[in-house]
Image (cartoon, rainbow, N blue to C red):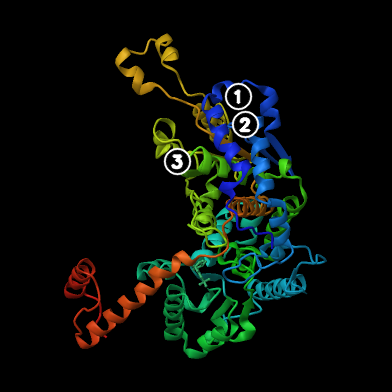
Amino acid sequence: MASSTALISETEAWKELKGHVEDIKKTHLRDLMNDANRCQKMMVEFDGLLLDYSRQCATVETMVKLLNLAKAAKLTEKISSMYNGEHINSTENRSVLHVALRAPKDAVIKADGENVVPEVWSVLDKIKEFSEKIRSGSWVGATGKPLKDVVAVGIGGSFLGPLFVHTALQTDPQAAEFAKGRQLRFLANIDPVDVARNVKGLNPETTLVVVVSKTFTTAETMLNARTLREWITTALGAPAVAKHMVAVSTNLALVEKFGIDPNNAFAFWDWVGGRYSVCSAVGVLPLSLQYGFDVVEKFLKGASSIDQHFQSTPLEKNIPVLLGLLSVWNVSFLGYPARAILPYSQALEKFAPHIQQVSMESNGKGVSIDGLPLPFETGEIDFGEPGTNGQHSFYQLIHQGRVIPCDFIGTVKSQQPVYLKGEVVSNHDELMSNFFAQPDALAYGKTPEQLQKENVSENLIPHKTFSGNRPSLSLLLPELSAYNVGQLLAIYEHRVAVQGFVWGINSFDQWGVELGKVLATQVRKQLHSSRTQGTALEGFNFSTTTLMKRYLETSSEPQM
Ligand code: F6P
């Protein structure tokens, strides 16, 4: 693959950008925004989407320099390596081919010399058939009743992406129509409270449990799966598992060992990273059960449209590339460590949590892909809430406290339009008034001179001053159909990859999640032996020993 041992920070292009920071510090967005010519160059349209990045603290010259950085990082070659199925996830020796999950049936995408698209479509066809059986009631539960409710058990990438898409589609009129009378719930946390909340009001007789785990070894998911298996078998007897439990995994041997019929298992592959798996059976199965396969296919088509754009559009007009480069600029050069994801759409309320994993698990790394310690930080702290809720929560800090580059995401059309007679604007116009106003408030700010002219009392002027010059970008979607949700997902997935390619890290492994898991195993063993044999705590530091002692001595957990 196109990797190199030199750190990107040693290249001329990087140093050029470092020097350029001083030029940018002399500018203010208030002035930059007055240059319509510049602003026009900072807008891109593709397939109904409009990206406006004119409110970034960047000039046309900055963009040229960022494109030079992309060249120095061999970005085009790295994108090709991904699409060509090279093992760019080198620490796990795997290809990275989530793009194959939404490729058209006649596409050819190879992993290890094999075209994977037919395999992808054979699983999609199986999901289509199975979900139609469940939805039509031709597949029934152990007592002969149709299965109208689904609990998807999974965590991390086996949860957040499907939850985001489900939440986004819930109020889409077409999707909602197809979901009538059905429920889809997600059980992720090992906290028994999550189990209690998710089975509340459900009847095992009419519930299908989908166990979703790439590895089928994740401690939380497996215990939750056993807990729901118990819930089903207690009510309906052991043979009911065959009718009420199915699985999604790359590890079909473990699925069988768990007691789920391999015919009721839906495969995916090790070239799909967990956090990039929503377009595999991980998301497609639960979502098809809820909304029908046709709706989910539209979602896949939206993602595929962006995949093609990302693969073939010149860098300067390529939306994920531009977004990725601007994020690198904000993090590595302007020194802004966070990014706010602010959809002006309640349907996108689970978008930021999903992108938190996609981005932070991918790019929160300390060494280059070749294992060299990095002299610069990678990744950013992603957080967000839908507008306008965020405005009444953390926007104070964004306007007058720390500088946080913001992504404003809005839609032209509402999924659920409301207009009340006599109101000045429709409810969606009211929402979007904020979408248009906030980026300018951040960019322009308000000067003491303006406040003086408004006769604001002297003592309040410092408090009411807004420095402005706070970067944001605006992404306007025509609406929030399944297709647009797919587009949005793919844009962010590829943006994160672009950042990682430029920083020269491996965005597709996640070794950082391992240590905590290992230590939890040691704690689990100790809890077991202390509870069953009264074994004294051993091998923990003073702090952990004290905490565990308190827990064991005062807890009311049932003794085994
Ligand atoms: O949190 C670590 C992680 O490995 C994620 O990368 C992954 O999405 C999640 O656990 C769940 O893993 P699995 O799908 O194998 O249960």
Q: Is residue 120 left or right of residue 162?
A: right
The residue at the point 41 percent across, 36 percent down is 402
- In the depicted structure, whether residue 218 falls above or below residue 179: below
Q: Is residue 465 left or right of residue 303?
A: left
Residue 167 in picture, x, y percent from top left = 55, 55
Tell me, yes or no, whether the two marked residues, 2 and 3, touch with CB atoms within 8 Å. Answer: no
Q: Tell me the tag on residue 54.
A: 2
Mark 2 vs mark 3, CA separation in Å: 22 Å
Image coords of residue 470 (percent x, y): 50, 31
Q: Name the residue under label 1.
A: 33
| Image quadrant occupied by the C terminus | bottom left
Some atom of ligand 1 lies within 8 Å of the CB belonging to the residue at label 1: no
Q: In this view, does 163 lie to the left or right of 97?
A: left
In front of the other: 520 or 297: 520
Q: Are marks 1 and 2 in contact (CB under 8 Å)?
A: yes
Viewer-nearest residue: 467 or 228: 467
In front of the other: label 1 or label 3? 1
Number of marks in the rendered image: 3
Question: Where's the N terminus, which quadrant?
Answer: bottom right
Q: Earlier in the sequence, mark 2 or mark 3?
A: 2
Q: What residue type is labelled 3?
A: Gly
Q: Distance between the residues labelled 1 and 2?
A: 7 Å
Q: In which quarter of the image is residue 116?
A: bottom right
- Secondary structure, mark 3, is helix
Instruction: Check disc 1 and give the amino acid type.
Output: Met
Q: Where is residue 146 in the image (x, y as percent from the top left)?
A: 59, 76
**Residue, disc 3:** 390
What element does badge 1 sit on?
loop
Q: How crowded is mark 2: few (under 14 residues within 10 Å), some or many (20 or more)?
A: many
> Taking the image as drawn, is residue 437 in sight?
no
CA gap, disc 1 and disc 3: 25 Å
